[in-house]
Image (tube, grey):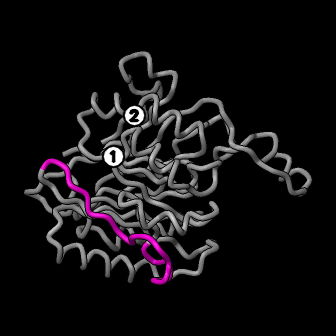
Amino acid sequence: MRILVLGDIVGRPGRKFMSDHLKNFIKNKNISLCIANGENAAGGAGITAKTAHELKTAGIDAITLGDHVWDQKNFENEIDQLDFVCRPANLPGSNPGKDHLILEGENTMVGLFTVLGRSFMGPKVACPFTTADRIVNDLKKQNVDQIICEIHAETTSEKESIGWYLDGRVSLVFGTHTHVPTADGRILPKGTAYQTDLGMTGPRESVLGRDIEACVGRFLDGMPRKCPVAEKDVGMQGCMIEVNNDSPCKSVKYQRIEFREDATDQSLRPPRSPSLNIQ
């Protein structure tokens, strides 16, 4: 079974790209499940029930969130009605929303959860390592076949550490939050696929999805200013894994995914760079 996992969806450009192209991509690549981080889907910060349903209609089966989970007004009152959305598992237990999801595809049960990192991150959260232990153990008691863990964090060291910590116990550990894809995707020695950061689904002619001039201006003069979502060179970044129930909680194949608007009219060809399709 093939599972597509996409980096942070940024604003209206990211949502529109999903609506315009995702279903064809899924069909052409024979993908059974599609997972995406949606914490920047509404105006570039947070998510709403409306935008979550828009992404589900576009073809996304499950949406994860990050440190911007509560940025949109009233979302804390909406999340419990969204059975395809989970908030970070190491937020305080009093927070609304699911701390994990169980998805089904091709007679395979897939557990999914997110933990927030603690280095240089705003929210005060429980230890991501012990939280991951708890969720993995709970999912295995529910007899899931494959487990996917997202680490939404700032530092590569924290992300890599949890990748090694969970190697052999989950099918995939992927990082989000920085919006810039890393070139370290691979299958670790005990069978867990890993990539430090998937990148983003949004405008790449930008600074992390935001208007270039405004972001550069902040560094030049230090003055506060709004940084609206950019609009040009939109595409999606992520990875695709293949799993087999003969090998529970392991990946048999990993591939980095990058798909741009300038490729959409050529039968979903891979991007020009030869370094994108690895392993």
Q: Residue at x 64, y 44 (%)?
A: 209
Earlier in the chain: of badge 1 and badge 2, it is 2
* Residue 99, placed above or below residue 85: below
Q: In the image, residue 106 lies at what x, y percent? A: 14, 47
| Residue 192 occupies quadrant | bottom left
* Residue 89, placed above or below residue 266: below
Q: Helix, strand, or loop for circle 2?
A: helix
Q: In the image, residue 276 lies at what x, y percent? A: 42, 36
Q: Which residue is mark 1?
A: 34
Which mark is on residue 22? 2
| In the image: residue 90, left or right of residue 29 | right
How many residues crowd around disc 2 within 10 Å: few (fewer than 14), some, or many (20 or more)?
A: some
The answer for how far apart the CA atoms under marks 1 and 2 are is 9 Å
- 164 in magenta: no
The answer to which of 180 and 102 lies nearer the viewer is: 102
Give, as a three-letter code, the residue at label 1: Cys
Circle count:
2
Q: Helix, strand, or loop for circle 1?
A: strand
Principal secondary structure, stretch drawn in magenta: loop
| In the image: residue 4, left or right of residue 107 | right
- 92 in magenta: yes
Give the magenta-colored segment's residue range. Answer: 89-106
Q: Residue at x 36, y 66 (%)?
A: 113
Q: Residue at x 52, y 63 (%)?
A: 66
Q: Are marks 1 and 2 in contact (CB under 8 Å)?
A: yes
How many residues crowd around disc 1 within 10 Å: few (fewer than 14), some, or many (20 or more)?
A: many
Give, as a three-letter code, the residue at label 2: Leu
